[in-house]
Amino acid sequence: MSRIYYTKPSITELEVKYATDAAANGWGDQCYAYIEKFERGFAKHLGTAYAIATSSCTGAMHMGLAALGVGRGDEVILADINWIATVSPVVHLGATPVLVDILPDTWCLDPEKVEAAITSRTKVIIATHIYGSLCEMDRLLEIGRRHGIPVIEDAAEALGSVYRGKRAGSIGAFGTFSFHGTKTLTTGEGGMFVTNDPALYERVLTLSNHGRARGETRQFWSERVGFKYKMSNIQAAIGCAQLERIEELVEKKRHIFALYKVALAPLASVTRMNVEHAGTTNSYWMPTLVFDQQAGLDRDALLRMFKEENIDGRVFFWPLSKLGVEGVPTDVDTPVAHSVSPRAINLPSYHDMGEVEVERVATVLTNFHDR
Ligand SMILES: *Cc1c(COP(=O)(O)O)cnc(C)c1O
């Protein structure tokens, strides 16, 4: 039985053509051509004024937070449910992560908990749109405005998601994206920083170029210590091809989720799948199941059954506070995060999955459910 991967990029002749062209011709005066095209195209797609291609989302976040002045003594509020990449730059910059609880339906930041966590040291609020679900941006922005604190978006998992007519990542002071091989649009490794703020754009541009400002006429002259988180032209070539196919890539994710929704509807123990509230579009990066608390799910046994059937399954993100890593607080009050995490899994959703594969996954879940 063929393996059902949890994710796998959708690569066509177009990606191969552009990458080949970049490898053959993308040098000398053409060495930034695909990068510039990818940045322009991405900003246009998102509806932001500026975009800077990076080597990862982590790098984009690191530079964005640095450009906002995050440093020692500052606090940064984010959800306890997050991939570690979101908190790492906060720790690297010497700031203190403040982990707050999530909402039970979107698994994103609980605005009330955010407001309660604000102190005189709060510098930034990071809104991560987890698994394609959207944070309550209007409420977060309103809280941010009232306290004079910028809200930024980690939209690594939400390319294609839309909140009240605005694309995820284009709403806050800045947004970041990942093009890692598991993401909806991939360049292998890669990321993007986006913003509508010209001053912030200039600061990140300078940071991303080892602190060398755009207008600087002296060669090799840095005005400050910066970063080196650049995307290569070859990666950007693949990104350009993927971007031309973005509607298709997102539509495929939504189609897979719809198939799951139908196939899993009879399972009484599933309390929740990814939600799509009125006024939003969910790009369903990862179809996710949360099992009923009473069902007493043996998640390890379920994942073993998946493995026996040659199907990938993955556990929901752990609360960051549970990891016990240096720089990340462990003593936090986040009951929803701790309740949801152990009884939730992500299902396979590579773009070319069809009804047959979804049925195979659903059969395992049904058999497990009926044991
Ligand atoms: C994948 C991911 C990242 C990290 O992306 P990289 O490109 O690997 O740095 C950050 N945040 C979230 C929410 C992610 O899912």
Image (spheres, rainbow, N blue to C red):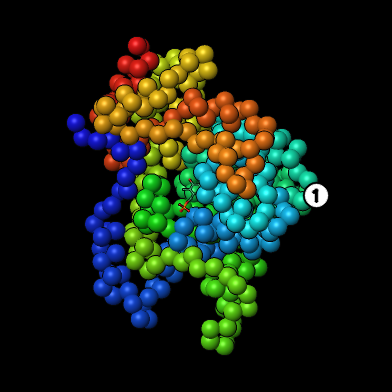
Does label 1 point to a residue whose CB lies under 8 Å from ligand 1? no
Look at 66% across and 56% down and name the residue there: 94
Q: Which residue is drawn at 65% across and 47% down?
A: 97
Q: Report the quarter where the C terminus lies.
A: top left
Q: Is residue 102 above or below residue 123?
A: above
- Identify the residue shown where x is 53% and y is 17%: 293
Number of dots carrying numbers? 1
How far from the left and from the top, in percent, is residue 325?
57, 44
Residue 216 image point, x, y percent: 59, 83
Q: Is residue 281 visible?
A: no
Q: Which residue lies furthest to the top in this view?
A: 371
Amino acid at the residue labelled 1 = Ser
The answer to whether residue 317 is visible is yes
Residue 253: quarter of image: top left
Instruction: Examine the image and state in which quarter residue 301 appears.
Output: top left
Q: In which quarter of the image is the N terminus?
A: top left
Q: Which residue occupies 48% across, 45% down?
A: 157
Residue 5 at x, y = what percent? 30, 38
Instruction: Quickly name the residue at label 1.
Output: 120
Relative placement, left or right, of 107 versus 36 is right
Looking at the image, is 26 positioned above or below residue 98? below
Q: Where is residue 79 drawn, in percent x and y?
A: 61, 40
- In the rendered image, the vertical position of residue 159 relative to residue 53, given as above or below: above
